[in-house]
Image: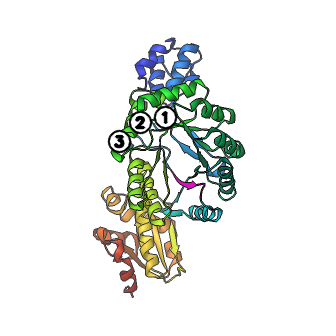
Amino acid sequence: MALSGLDIYKLLPKTNCRQCGLATCLAFAMQLAKKTVTIEKCPFISPEAKSILEAQAQPPIKLISLGSGESRLDLGNETVMFRHEEKFRNPAGLGFIIDDNLKDEEIRLRLQKIEQLKFERVGQKLEVNLVAIKQNTDGKRFLEAVKLVLNNTALPLMLISSDPASLRQSAEFSAERKPLLYGATKDNFKQIGQIAKELGLPLVAVEEDIDKLSRLTKELNALGVNNLILDTGPKPVTEKIWDLTQIRRQALKKSNRALGYPTLVIVETADRYEEAIEAAAYIAKYAGLVLIKGLDTWEVLSILTLRQNIYTDPQKPLQIEPKLYPIGQASEKSPVLITTNFSLSYYTVLGEVEASKIPSYILSVDTEGMSVLTAWAAEKFNAQSITRSLEKFGVKEAVKHNNLIIPGYVAVMSGDLEEQSGFKVIVGPKEAAGIPAFLKNLN
């Protein structure tokens, strides 16, 4: 458990020297508890107390980075059990397993498909994160497959092998890309741990029982291996979710540093629908990295969409830049539609306007990321705010007509908006799905 302000106060020198910028040591302790100041602000704290407070300041789940450069994947650094308490910080990684017994051409084709799995939703890019090479043959073929992957993708790499010699050979060859090694068990942790330590690589600790997993991470820490990811092995979905939840609770609620690492799940089912459902369940219940084999666009997009929804900040709605957006070959005769700068609202309207194939303008009004009805109820989407946006973004200069289209749900503001803006207000459909037919029949 995190130290309270009073717990921190007991460790401070209690001199009230004010050199930290606050009136008393108690005030400083309270700010430390809120993480608004750092311990370095106190010039008289003892080394022992500083060590305790620095250890407490570390996130309960260690930050682990895989790969390097622009494709680097950060996992962990989480601080809460539930998103509404604060936010989840680093989205769960989604990776793909490629077996080394596949032919070279088949591996290339799978890598090409993986590289194409890039999407955009409500203004955000959705991308996959990792490629895992699994050894099923000898060390020579495993290394060949690793080389093939390295030459065809910049995504972070994971090496899956139960043979320490093969794992070392491939790890040494790919060390510059900082691959994740899988994995250390109670039987081989000294050999595998030594590889990870020598090459400075992250390692997966594998143990079915959580208590034994905790002991295994301690033994790896004693060897000098501290960048770990945890896996409790193949289990039924309900048992796996239990493991993920308990590991998270132990790290956050019990301050169990031995379990304070991101978790990994390998989904092992040939049915792609079941695979998507399982992957979604694990992402929703604390998995840090999920590995699958399916490369179908529908499956991957559904998983990434769910991940996006879970890892958005609930205290900061997704929003776009408020401005006048031309859609298609918009001209001075094009209709002007009004909406808010809530991303989902804007991109929903955008999709329907594009579907209509009628060049238009969309005026995105700054509502602090609120949707139409929410912003209207909060008085952030009203005649005054829309009029300000019309003037700020030069709508009168962009079009030669005098018409505005507002969402049907806020038709009640029509009179005030006409009076304040000088524009003629046309009430559009309540639902965005009605926009194509509405625009086609507008004239």
What element does badge 2 sit on?
Answer: helix
Which residue in the rendered view is the most extreme toward the left? 412
Residue at label 2? 248
Residue where numbered disc 3 is placed: 239
Callout 2 environment at 10 Å: few (<14), some (14 to 19), or many (20+)? Answer: many
Q: Nearer the viewer, residue 23 or 303?
A: 303
Name the foreground residue: 335 vs 391: 335
**Picture colour scheme:** rainbow
Q: Is residue 341 visible?
A: no
Q: Residue at x 55, y 18 (%)?
A: 50
| Camera-nearest residue between 386 and 80 | 80
* Secondary structure that dominates the magenta span: strand
Give the alpha-carbon distance from disc 1 to disc 3, as whole Å: 21 Å
Can residue 78 be seen at all in this image of the molecule? yes
Q: Which residue is mark 1?
A: 61
User: Which part of the image, by quadrant, shows the N terminus?
Assistant: top left
Residue 272 in the image: x percent, y percent?
42, 61
Q: Which residue is located at x 33 percent, y 60 percent?
A: 376
Residue 199 position, x and y percent, is 68, 36
Disc 2 or disc 3, which is closer to the eye?
3
Task: Say whether marks 1 and 2 touch (CB < 8 Å).
Answer: yes
Mark 1 or mark 3, whichever is nearer to me: 3
> Of helix, strand and loop, which one carries label 1?
loop
Q: For the magenta stretch, what is the residue range? A: 94-101
Q: Indicate the position of residue 23 as horizontal and vertical percent values.
A: 49, 20
* Residue 179 percent across, percent down from the top left: 63, 44
Classify 125 as above or below 171. Answer: below
Q: Is 165 displayed left or right of 306 in the figure?
A: right
